């Protein structure tokens, strides 16, 4: 991407507007979990591996991202996380979004702004996953292990 | 989108960097055809209808976009357009992109920069289609007829 | 088909028995909408384009058939039309038809005879679409624009 | 169907024009095998069971129809029968039919008229299967055993 | 398999432990019906044909296995058999098994041990079907007719 | 499983006959890679996580199993590993196995006994994955990190 500086800058400006905004109820770990769950649908090695590492770091949970990679419905998710991923995956799969979708989010304490945040992250990575595919991006080797061995032993227990 | 001015600006800045760049071998009609073909896969009413209208206007062909909507492989496409849509749809479907994909483009006179342009348009609209879905965007009524009866020149300006 | 006069006559005799019967609650526009919705599933260019034109003419609605082509569940359909297309598409997809399917039709004012009419049109075009495929039928160019620019201006507003 | 005599007559007139024509290279057993192979795709109990019985009777082969029901590609088919079913199933699945499809038929001794016959039988039963679905037709009990126990013992060997 | 005696013995020892255990509420016919229904999903000619024959013999019903082969949801199944096949097919398709699945079984009088029996038969034949595929096993010709012509005429009536 | 000692013993006797046989050209790491690749298709958290850990330990490669989890066709596999997984996945998906499948294995130095070994491991885990699903097995927390941090730093480089 670096050989096209204008596109490169525009991509990251948009990325920053979405991922680094201060407002809203999504934690950094929430955002990374959305990226892991949707990038696995699009079979994007770079995004799954890099954002799994970030999720492990932000959440201090060394197992959840891997669980979501294999079978998100059987992962140790809270009801709130489950609703968040359901919405993100509906957007990811280009399903028709109905009032029922928003209602399920609201039932878990998400407001309309959060719904937008979940949807836009899912949509943005629908794009990023596809760019990574045709540019053949590979994850750095260190991403595979990052965040797996927490310093404090009590962090190893998955909830 | 307008209630989030920072994201709105970033989206359109990126859109402009991709769609309005001067260089490359893709015509305006080519770009719109890519958007029609990929947006139909994502079942996005707004994008299909608006960009079909733009394709009709740029190409002066009142039928091709509709043909692509129903069954792109049976549409009256040139070999060059067929190769372009094959690549765009492989990116759209998040397929693994191989050397063979790039070779097929090269065989039709596309270079590496064109391959990037086709891929990035397909990827960008993978995002846009999904945003349109969760924001429930509807096409303006005039898009359905625009460019079908090419008499009124004033209709040509795209939003 | 014309080189087989016996089959040609039998096909159209059956077509007439189904499409031009006087009785029942389906309007001409209803019938055409069923054909558009099911022919898009079968990716039949001829049938989608020709019967979209007929729907525009009978319904005086220049946009609805196009909406149904892209994403029937997000089209501006009445509850009655939605139920009609749900049944037609279940038949089109060779799904098991249950009492629940008939109940949903009844809830929208359709009787058993109407259910038969919807089902038989969907089934007949399952056949016609396939014949058009292997005989490589192409729509006449005028079908693409027919019924798009109504003479009276009040017809343009889609609900 | 009998409560709609006009449709009933038109259906059978068309059926006769297709199934009972004298000309062409398809045997009665060939035609029944096409119906079994395509009706299994559409999951139509009546057509599969009734036409399996007819195939057993015409072919004097008590096993082939059952083999085709489970997995047609692994059935004991001749190269000619395999090509015939490949074409029939492409039509059944509403795939785009190309020159390559016709070439494969020609390689096995089928001419253009035979291609039409295979295609039209597949298309006609795409319709019939769907009618049987929404009218909930059930096969007569005797169809399940018909043609299974040939009188001459040498018929039991499947080729 | 016979050229690997250790594996051969282990396979049949496990088969016997599952299929020939005395306890539980599944009849021999129930077990065979599970095998027919799941083997058809895996398109295994040997297992479908051999176990259909066994089902006909154990159940004295010459039609039910064939009905299940074509379209299990439209077969003449009891509510108990329907629940049993629903669970078996969920396991066969590697779906996530939830409390709801077990509840539906319990509603039809199955206990936890029966649920295990249904699941393990479905899982065992997920393996057997695949072994039959890569070893290209073919059913014996007599399996196709076995159990089809009952000696007592009153058995022909399917319920 | 432990509450059914006879089945438990039979399962592990068969497992041992397959996984712990001395002969053949598959390494321990090869066998674990087959299990990872096929268990991800069946979405089995226990098998993917436990056998990924074993693969990391046997292969001393901390990244390959994760790559295979996300997108096996884009993983850093040797041509030999690619052919091995292609065959294993064809068996896993219950595809028809043809001479071409065996030829591709032979081209990479696998003999008929190896083909059997690959096939039987894939088939055995088609069963195991499904048992894990309905018994709701969960991977031990330590499996997630096992084999990720090699003592010698030079092992971190993925080939």
Image (tube, coloured by chain):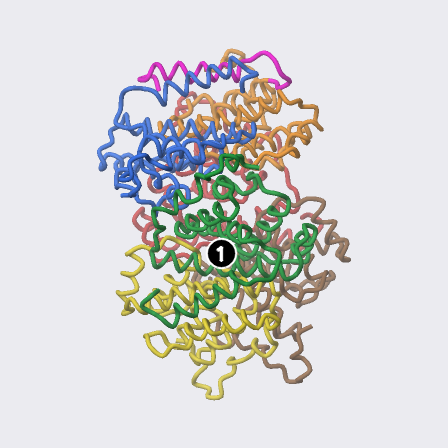
Chain colours: A blue, B orange, C red, D brown, E yellow, F green
What element does badge 1 sit on?
helix
In the rendered image, residue B99 lying in the magenta stretch gets the answer no
Q: In this picture, is A142 found above or below F52?
A: above
- The residue lying toward the viewer, choosing from F88 and D134, is F88
Which residue does the numbered mark 1 point to in the structure image? D130
Q: Position of residue C2 (x, y in %)?
A: 69, 47
Image quarter for residue B107?
Answer: top right
x%, y% of residue A44?
49, 35
| x, y percent for residue E11 | 50, 70
Residue nearest the viewer, comparing E30 with A62: A62
Residue A64 vs residue B155, the one in the foreground:
A64
Left or right: E150 with respect to E76?
A: right
Chain that bears disc 1: D
The C terminus of chain A is located in which quarter? top left
Span shown in magenta: B1-27
Specify the quadrant that holds the N terminus of chain A: top right
Q: Is residue D129 above or below residue A85?
A: below
In this view, the residue in front, D115 or F136, is F136
Residue C131 higher or lower than B91, as above or below = below
Q: Is residue C17 visible?
A: no
Residue C13 versus residue F23 in the image, above or below: above
Q: Does residue E125 appear in this view?
A: yes
Give the image quarter of residue A134: top right
């Amino acid at each position: 991407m670096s050989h096209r500086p204008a596109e490169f800058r525009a991509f990251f400006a948009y990325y920053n507007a979405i991922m680094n905004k201060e407002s809203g109820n999504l934690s950094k770990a929430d955002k990374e979990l959305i990226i892991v769950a949707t990038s696995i649908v699009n079979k994007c090695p770079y995004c799954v591996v890099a954002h799994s590492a970030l999720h492990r770091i932000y959440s201090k949970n060394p197992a959840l991202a891997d669980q979501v990679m294999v079978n998100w419905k059987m992962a140790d998710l809270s009801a709130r996380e489950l609703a968040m991923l359901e919405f993100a995956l509906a957007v990811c799969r280009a399903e028709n979004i109905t009032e029922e979708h928003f209602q399920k989010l609201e039932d878990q304490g998400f407001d309309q702004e959060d719904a937008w945040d979940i949807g836009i992250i899912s949509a943005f990575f629908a794009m990023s996953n596809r760019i990574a595919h045709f540019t053949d991006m590979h994850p750095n080797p260190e991403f595979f292990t990052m965040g797996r061995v927490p310093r404090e032993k009590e962090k190893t227990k998955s909830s």
